[in-house]
Image (cartoon, rainbow, N blue to C red):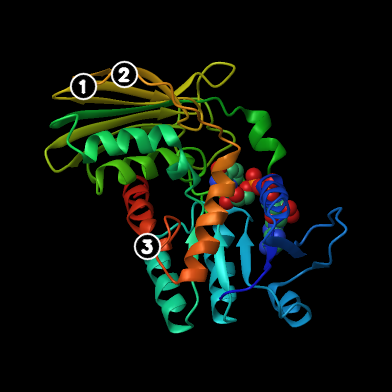
Amino acid sequence: MKKNIFNVAIVGLGHIGKLHSEIINSMTNAKVVAIVDTYPIKTNLPVFLSIKECNISHPEIDMYVIATPNGYHYQQAKEVLESGKNVLVEKPIALHKEQVKELITLSHKHNVRVFTSLQLRFSPVINYVKKLYENNLLGNLYLVTVECFWNRNTTYYEKNSWHGTKEIDGGVLFTQFSHFIDIMFYLLGSLELVNNKTENFSHQNCIEFPDTGILQFKSGKTWGNMVYTISTYEKNFESSITLIAEKGTIKIGGQYMNQLLYHNVENIDPVEIECNTNKFHKNLYEDIILSLDKNTPSIADAENAAEIIGFIEKTTS
Ligand SMILES: NC(=O)c1ccc[n+]([C@@H]2O[C@H](COP(=O)([O-])OP(=O)(O)OC[C@H]3O[C@@H](n4cnc5c(N)ncnc54)[C@H](O)[C@@H]3O)[C@@H](O)[C@H]2O)c1
């Protein structure tokens, strides 16, 4: 795909679509050439109501970015792949594992690529811990705990009509906390769900799914649990991952898993890790463009997301 400029169209220029646009336009080798959105939006770029119309007017597009509400991702990604273009789909790539598998099959059939936004995999903090674990510097990993205590109140759900519905939002593990499950897969390789309890404590009038859950998982000999809620009083309180291992204890925190909160590891002094969360999306695009240029795998390949979607799906069934 060697080209000087990588041409992108964004489908859904909302909150995250605007961020994608800024990042792409800040790169010297990429630019946004068109927008697809069904609502009137302010932009200097040509806006289309459908991917089909956009494709006809802009055959030079190399990749579409799907940044619409969750429930539209699968259908829109499918349309892009069938038109013979690459696609980057915001998280969650789809709401069902079978849909992700179908998108991957379609990408092979049409000789294009399908990626998803797993940008927390570019966190230097996460990668530092991953290296420690993979190089056996932590010894046996006994226990992993994930705690996500956020606040999403009624106003949040009233303001955004797509949030809160089972069909288009899907649930809090898809919309709020899928990055944390992704990081579990990234660190541990695979997860098996062994127990799952959910409850709707304080959102009965505005969401169609539980607001809280406690789940247990296993990965080889490692046991893990995840406790999550969007019912925390007044504001977000914490999101963190704690690893209890034979030769060390580590706690990672911050909304974007960007802080090393605790580090006590045999023979290794605590480290200062610079972690600029603004760079994660840029790193994601650099990885995608390089992988298309060289025809090599990317961290953002959809193959890395199918199991995550399957795992979340099991917690909702
Ligand atoms: N990777 C991340 O960290 C991250 C962060 C926030 C959101 N997201 C994901 O990004 C997606 C969008 O979230 P958001 O917060 O930007 O939502 P948003 O509501 O702010 O924006 C959605 C945009 O899509 C447009 N749209 C709606 N239906 C459409 C359709 N059928 N065709 C074309 N455009 C359509 C809307 O007009 C709007 O401009 C969600 O899937 C969300 O989970 C990811």
Compared to residue 90, the image places residue 135 above or below, namely above
Examine the image and state in which quarter residue 125 appears.
top left
Residue 254 point in image, percent of width and height: 48, 25
Element at label 3: helix
Q: Which mark is residue 303?
A: 3
Q: Distance between the residues labelled 3 and 1?
A: 31 Å
**Few, some or many residues within 10 Å of mark 2 (<14, 14–19, 20+):** some
- The amino acid type found where label 2 is placed reads His
Viewer-side label of 2, 3: 2
Residue 43 bears which disc, if any? Answer: none
Q: Is mark 2 within 8 Å of ligand 1?
A: no
**Amino acid on which disc 3 is placed:** Glu
Specify whether 22 is left or right of 169: right
Nearest to viewer (mark 3 / mark 1):
1
Which residue is the site of mark 1? 248
Decide which of tag 1 and tag 2 comes sooner along the chain.
Answer: 1
Task: Specify few, some or many for label 1: CA neighbours under 10 Å numbering under 14, 14-19, or 20 or more.
Answer: some
Where is the N terminus found, in terms of image quarters? bottom right
Toward which corner of the image does residue 278 lie, by quadrant? top right
Q: Which residue is drawn at 45% across and 31% down?
A: 257
- For marks 2 and 3, the one nearer the N-term is 2
Tell me the quarter of the picture where residue 210 sits: top left
Q: Residue 6 placed where, x, y %? A: 65, 67
Please indicate, yes or no, whether residue 90 appears anywhere in the rendered image: no
* Relative horizontal placement of residue 29, taking residue 178 as reference (left or right): right
Q: Mark 2 points at which residue?
A: 263
In the image, residue 111 lies at what x, y percent? 47, 81
Q: What element carries label 2?
A: strand
